[in-house]
Image (tube, rainbow, N blue to C red):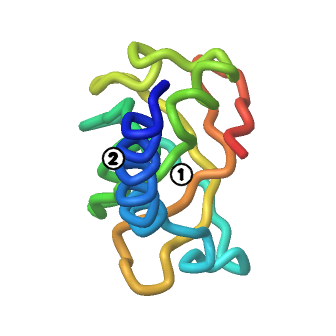
Amino acid sequence: MTSITRRLFLSLATALVPGAAIAHHGWGGYDTSKSFTVTGEILKSTYENPHCQIEMEVDGKHWRFVLAPPSRMERRGITPDMIAPGKTCTVFGYPHTSNPDEARIEYIILDGKRIELR
């Protein structure tokens, strides 16, 4: 790698890292004193960085559940098909402190199998 190429690479990497750090949130916005468990049908799912997500309607409330990143989901054996719309699952998690429709999920139960996400 030439010094010009190396400097260009480092400049681009430096420029992109702060944006990535801002885009990824911490878990401090979730209230771990208010854990809950719900079961329902998955309405929508995304299997992409920074975190996979599912949406469910439970007892008349629409939820967006934040799961693990795709790489961790894969290591735990969870494929996109397993969280596809129409599938039923149970999730255990913590509600967001300022967004009442969002929760961070610690584990998910798919096809009767409990899978830790953290």
- Residue at x 59% of width, y 19% of height: 74
- Looking at the picture, tell me which residue is in the foreground, 35 or 21: 21
- When asked about the image quadrant of residue 114, the answer is top right
Give how far apart the Cα atoms at labels 2 and 1 are.
Answer: 10 Å
Bin the neighbour count of mark 1 within 10 Å (Cα to Cα): few under 14, some 14-19, many 20 and up: some
Q: Is residue 41 left or right of residue 73?
A: left
User: Is residue 40 at least partly visible in the picture?
Assistant: no
Residue tagged 1: 38
Where residue 4 appears, as percent x and y from the top left, is 38, 39
Residue toward you, 69 or 12: 12
- Identify the mark nearer the N-term, 2 or 1: 1
Amino acid type, mark 1: Val
**Dot 2 surroundings within 10 Å: few (below 14), some, or many (20 or more)?**
many
Q: Nearer the viewer, residue 111 or 65?
A: 65
- The residue lying toward the viewer, choosing from 46 and 16, is 16
Report the residue at 34% width, 69% height from top.
101
Horizontal relation, residue 79 to residue 11: left or right: right
Name the mark on residue 56: 2
Q: Residue type at mark 2?
A: Met
Say whether marks 2 and 1 touch (CB < 8 Å).
Answer: yes
Placement of 7 over or under 1, stated as above or below? below
